[in-house]
Image: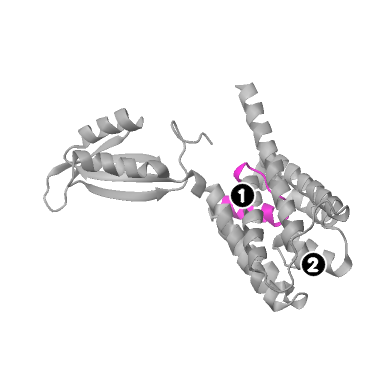
Amino acid sequence: MASYNVAVSWRNVSLILLGCAIYAFGIHYFVVPNELMEGGITGIALLINYSLGIPLSFTTLAINIPLFFLGWKTLGKSQMFYTVIGTASLSFFLWIMEALISLKWIVPFARETDYFLVTLYAGVTLGTGLGIVFRYGGTTGGSDIIVRIASKLKGWSMGQVTFGFDAIVISSSLLYIPPVKVLYTLVAVFITSRVIDYIMEGAYGAKAFTVITDRAAEIADLIIREMDRSATLLQAKGAYTQKNKTVLYCVVYRQESRRMRDIVKSVDPYAFIIVSDVHDVLGEGFKDK
């Protein structure tokens, strides 16, 4: 059991490193060359970079160090370990990008007027990076610590908290950058938040089927044989007819939902089917964490 936990930890660390690398690439390839903004500590670091020319790799690390103490008690030692890994690796990958750009091994995606593609790809890239980091228990420090604390204590979506917090920081940047770039930035941040939520939840999304039928046992048997899934049979009574009914409850992956519908309808064309979105499923046949 101990070796399994170590393997999982190193897998998480590796994926957090990957997420930070993608995020650092998006910042230096799309955001900085077009003088756009970001939220949280990265946004503050960008403003310092634009005004004083101090490298992002140094500023992000310097600002984040005091915030480590904020999350230590709330997030626990395990998550703070991943936070330290994420923050240090983000600064490292930002430095790598700065070096590669200075050597002209990478040419940033800069535009003069049309920022639509910049906004789109920046949002997708940053969201992918942060989503991977969040998904595997890490943060990139700064406001991400605050976001994770709010999500843990209040149960809010991490993407929603990120968008709200970043909107406040970015709005304050109106004193430093043109309003049109702030508007483009808000679009990029919104895309980022949606991509974060998709990676955190949507990619693992499932469908919950609640089926009211007189042939629940037959449907369950077919689900087991043809889909290698199980189901739960619940006894119920119709409020209008006062007749006893059997309710079948089954959770399947999104891509299996069409097959599930076909199975139910093939057994009972008159079955009453309720399909609900499920964003987090733990247990046999689904993700284990």
Q: Which residue is mark 1?
A: 131
Amino acid on which the number 2 mark rests in the picture: Leu
Q: Position of residue 246 (x, y in %)?
A: 20, 39
The image position of residue 75, as x and y in percent, is: 65, 45
Q: Nearer the viewer, residue 35 or 186?
A: 35
Colour basis = one colour
Q: Which mark is residue 274?
A: none
Identify the image quadrant of the C terminus: top right
Q: Which element type, helix, strand or loop, lies under badge 2?
A: helix
Question: Around disc 2, counting alpha carbons within 10 Å, would you say few (fewer than 14), some (14 to 19), or many (20 or more)?
Answer: many
User: Which residue is labeled 2 in the image?
Assistant: 47
Q: If you read the primary sequence from the N terminus, does the residue marked by circle 2 or circle 1 appear first?
A: 2
**Which image quarter: residue 112?**
bottom right
Q: Which residues are magenta?
A: 135-153
* Front-lying residue, 41 or 113: 113
Within 10 Å of disc 1 (Cα), the crowding (few <14, some 14-19, many 20+) is many
Q: What residue sits 71% from the left and 47% below the top?
A: 20
Residue at point 66%, 55% (across, down)? 126
